Amino acid sequence: MKKNNAILGCLFFILIFSCKKEEEISLGGFAKSGSAIITNEGAFGSSNGSISFLENSKITNNIFEAANSGLNVGDVVHYYQKVGNSGLIIVNNSKKVMIVDAESFKLKKTLTDGFTYPRFAVSITENKAYVSNGSGDGTILVVNIDSQKVVKTIAVGKGPEMILRYGSLVYVCNSGGFSNDDSTVSIINTSTDLEVKKITVGDVPVDMDFDANGNIWVLCKGVPDYSNFPFVERLTPANLIMINRNTQKVEKSFQILPKGSTDDVFRLAASNDGNTIYYNKSDGIYALNINSSSLPISPLIQGFFYGLDVNPDNGEIFGLDAGNFSSNGNIRKYSKSGLKLDSLSVGIAPNNIIFNK
């Protein structure tokens, strides 16, 4: 009798322990407000990109693989965008866009038709998204989430990159792609799915964000010379441009790097109140007040960061450190004043952090 009780006790313990362990590793809840999705490119050509999840200063890595029986995400996981109850994973070098359930990250459908060089995405409605696509002559592909198909193609400039929506208008950075020969921002009317205007900014616009007044700040890298790579020189200046949203004209222009510079610029993000524009150069993250008439002399945060974004809830600054691009990178969290708060290990070559709202 005692032996049977002991056996039952052991079985009960194992059952309880197994339940607790399963609870600890259970997945889901990846669309919670205040959390974030991190896209990790992986090593180029190695198909080892991944997705990480951040919640309450805790990182969960490889969430897509865990939700899909170990299925690989692909080569150069570049961006993620929530659209209604779904999410779009943009996998650049694999030339595909994966539709997942936003809560569980279970794969619904993989789209490949028409995607030659997918880069960024933006939600238009609960079941409609735009994806920037193309290294040369560029297009915006319209994805219907319900039918899980590309339903329309919108012609824009060459090499479309970052894409943002403000009301019924969408703005697209046309970088020129591999040839670096575009210097415009396209404006699309989302009611007609047609480009209505191009605004000339600076050479190779790659990133942008809105400030507190709804004006658009555009980061333009300038034309690089890769003929002596890894030594890269600017053939034209890198500029920070402000477009007045009401007039749709360039109102401010700052030169970040002069012609001939061997430094580089990477990303741009607005503070959560929209009064500060952050941008990162080779030596760190800089902070520009939107009313300032000159650029800051020194970085707010020193260090080399591959990616940059701001938590829209509390204004904390996130710098993404890709390290050597072949082993796990880190995301580093800073206060608005530039004080380092945390460092967390993620996948290989983290490039974007997208906050759930």
Image: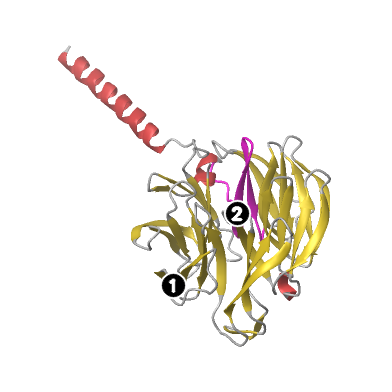
Question: Residue 313: x and y, percent?
Answer: 46, 46
Quadrant of residue 227 within the rendered picture: bottom right
Does residue 89 show up magenta in the picture? yes
Residue for point 33% across, 30% down: 20
Number of numbered discs visible in the structure rendering: 2
Q: Position of residue 19 (x, y in %)?
A: 36, 28
At x 77%, y 47%, the residue is 142
Front residue of 40/326: it is: 40
Percent x, y of residue 159: 74, 65
Location of mark 2 (residue): 213
Q: Earlier in the sequence, mark 2 or mark 1?
A: 2
Q: Farthest residue toward the top?
A: 1
Instruction: Please name whichever residue, 159 or 258, is drawn nearer the observer in this view of the structure.
Output: 258
22 with respect to 202 (left or right): left
Mark in the foreground, 2 or 1: 2
Depth check: give the residue in front, 177 or 194: 194
Q: Is residue 155 visible?
A: no
Looking at the image, residue 120 lies above or below residue 255: above
Query: What residue did someone put label 1 on?
Result: 299
For the magenta stretch, what is the residue range?
69-94
Instruction: Decide whether residue 188 is among the magenta residues.
Output: no
Q: Quadrant of residue 216?
A: bottom right
Q: Is residue 249 above or below residue 86?
A: below
Q: SS class of the residue under badge 2? A: loop
Q: Quadrant of residue 254?
A: bottom right
Mark 2 and mark 1 in contact? Answer it, CB < 8 Å.
Answer: no
Crowd rating for badge 1 (residues with CA inside 10 Å; few <14, some 14–19, many 20+): some
